[in-house]
Amino acid sequence: MKVGIVVFPGTNCDRDIFWSIKTLGGTPVYIWHEQEDAGDIDCIILPGGFSYGDYLRVGGLAKFSKIMDRIGLFADEGKFVIGICNGFQILCESGLLPGVLMRNINMRFICRDIFVKVERSGYVFTKNIEGKILKMPIAHKEGNFWCNNETYEGLKKNGQIVFSYCTLDSEIKDAANPNGSLHNIAGVCNIRGNVLGMMPHPERVCEELLGGVDGRQVLDFVGRENG
Amino acid sequence: MRFVVVVKLKQGILDPQGKAIRKVIERRGEKRIKDIRVGKYFEIEVEGSNRKETQKTVESISKDILSNPIIETVDIIQ
């Protein structure tokens, strides 16, 4: 599958994603954020980093980049969009995903491995891995997911909570919550299930050499023809 | 024309930054500070002489760009 990787000024995980997609059999291409057209691609990934230096609010300026209009249409067409870390923040800011990512509750930048439980599958990103525990790194200062009660009930009802921070024994509890996220939410998708946002970095764990391959379970759909 | 816009976290949204500042003040001996909430302050110069019109422009950018309505409120002070 041909995967577009959007590069904003300040994006810094674009090369990691590029490498991982290539490794998993996909065809990655870079898309500069000022491009209006994404070309003929099957999936768009918004990588991690510090788009626009995190000025104003994380993702708050990137959402006005030209490419974002195209990404909205792309999502409407049912094609796949993934936002990782800063990409997740941008998708929330642009309204393609519900909620918002606030400053971590301990006010610190957290960079370490965490465990997440795959809460749902059926959709392409987490096909066949429902209930699994994945070990992936997080690296962020604004990963504290929040939404109002009504939105949360909707997320639950529609099965939009994709990843939750958990212990190695798959317990979802405060002790396993690194950043204060509402109900340990680490990743959500839209109702249709084709837009995914997640704080952990699957692209950083696609090689044994780098300490793990759990990220492949999330990203390996890029190696298939149509997901 | 000059406007001042203040963006604040909505009531009920936890503000760990404000809490941390309050704690430090308390540690320094001032026990009377009950709560501190941190916001953003913008000074905006707008071209134009029609007050109503420029106010509208400022309102619109405050809502669409300067704040995230899910967690923040906007006050336009002047």
Image (spheres, helix red, strand yellow):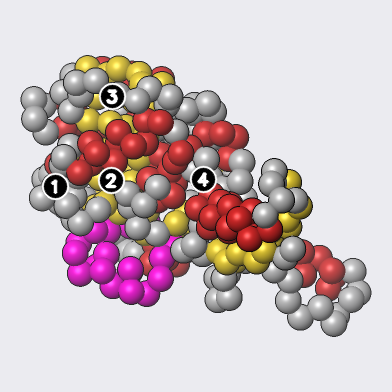
* Badge nearest the viewer, 4 or 2: 4
- Mark carried by residue A123: 1
Mark 2 sits on what residue? A196
Query: Which numbered disc flags the more N-terminal residue, 3 or 2?
Result: 3
* Badge nearest the viewer, 3 or 2: 3
Q: Chain of mark 2?
A: A
Cα separation between marks 4 and 2: 18 Å
**Between B13 and A18, the one nearer to me in the picture:** B13
Q: What's under tag 2, amino acid-wise?
A: Leu
Cα separation between marks 3 and 2: 18 Å
Tell me what residue is drawn at x 74 percent, y 63 percent. B78
Q: Chain of mark 3?
A: A
| Element type at mark 2 | strand
Quadrant, the C terminus of chain A: top left
Query: Which numbered disc flags the more N-terminal residue, 2 or 1?
Result: 1
Cα separation between marks 4 and 1: 28 Å
Quadrant, the N terminus of chain A: top left
Mark 4 sits on what residue? A60
Marks 2 and 1 close (CB-CB < 8 Å)? yes
**Would you call the spot at circle 4 few (<14 residues within 10 Å), some (14-19), or many (20 or more)?**
many
- In the rendered structure, the answer to whether residue A83 lies left or right of residue A125 reads right
Q: What's under tag 1, amino acid-wise?
A: Tyr
Q: Which residues are magenta?
A: A146-165
Q: What's under tag 3, amino acid-wise?
A: Ala
Mark 3 sits on what residue? A38
